Image (cartoon, rainbow, N blue to C red):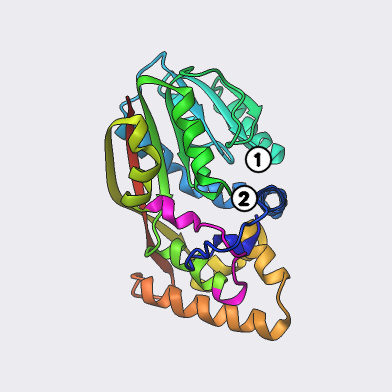
Amino acid sequence: MSISSLATSPVRDSAQPDLAALKTRQQGTWASGDYAVVGTTLQIVGEQLCESLDVRAGQKVLDVAAGNGNASLAAARRWCDVVSTDYVPALLGRARERAAAERLKIEFQEADAEALPFPDGGFDAVVSTFGVMFTPDQDKAAAELARVCRSGGKIGLANWTPDGFIGQVFKTIGKHLPPPAGVKSPALWGTRARIEEMFGPHASSIQAEPRNFVFRYRSPEHWLQVFKTYYGPLLKAFGALEPAAQAALTNDLMVQIDRFNRSGDTAMVVPSEYLEIVVTRR
């Protein structure tokens, strides 16, 4: 992903970004490092989302921008018929390995969240955890989620909020690598107002519940080392900066962790707010 597109700075409407080029850079970013190392720690979010959706055995569930398959695995554990999609084949490969290890039946398919290769109303539930929020064309992606969900079905999302820890990480990155002009912040998906704007016309109801995922690492330095090595957006950010600028970004991130950290010792225990959304399709 283009790192600068992840920042939470204001949108500059006067410019028209090249969304196709941005998407290509995004794919390269998410394919770098090994997101699965980070993604697997977020499994509890997929489990919680499936409970909030009240998914039932036998329902058809589509996981969009599934990454290494957290929500896919959670739905399959509940005996749903699951299709797991992403536009990074390597991530689908890691999800496939996890499903095989647990003997869970999941169909994996490479797909773009902005052009899903599925019929209208084909799924009882459509889910995405920290995935679809990073699409360049937000309105197109939201319309696709709504299109493939049947009337009376549910769309379940988990999106980082602007003011939570990860939202602030993206904002910090944006200070050092400003976003392209005209690109909407992914963190808008973590606001009730933007969700209602995108899904309101398709919804009979929208529920939005702030929740926290807690990052638990040996130390702030441990978190940074893991994210710099495996998490594409941060890996690419550091790779794009000169040594002095890397040191400045490191310092800003350490200050931010200290502000959120509630461990009381040398460990890192940092709650990161996200918005859990359940849209019931009209």
Residue under pointer 2: 35
Residue 258 shows in this picture:
yes
Image quadrant occupied by the C terminus:
top left
* Kind of residue at badge 2: Tyr
Residue 132 is situated, as x and y percent measured from the top left of the image, at: 52, 43
Residue 77 is situated, as x and y percent measured from the top left of the image, at: 44, 25
Residue 232 disc label: none
- In three-dimensional space, the C-alpha distance between marks 2 and 1, rounded to whole angstroms, equals 8 Å
Given residues 139 and 1, the one toward you in this image is 139
Can residue 230 be found in the magenta stretch? no
Residue 191 is situated, as x and y percent measured from the top left of the image, at: 35, 53
55 vs 72, left or right, is left
Taking the view exactly as shown, the residue that stands out farthest to the bottom is 244
Pointer 2 and pointer 1: residues touching (CB < 8 Å)?
A: yes
Q: Residue at x 66, y 79 (%)?
A: 246
Given residues 27 and 227, the one toward you in this image is 27
Image quadrant occupied by the N terminus:
bottom right
Q: Residue at x 60, y 50 (%)?
A: 37
Residue under pointer 1: 91
Taking the view exactly as shown, the residue that stands out farthest to the top is 58
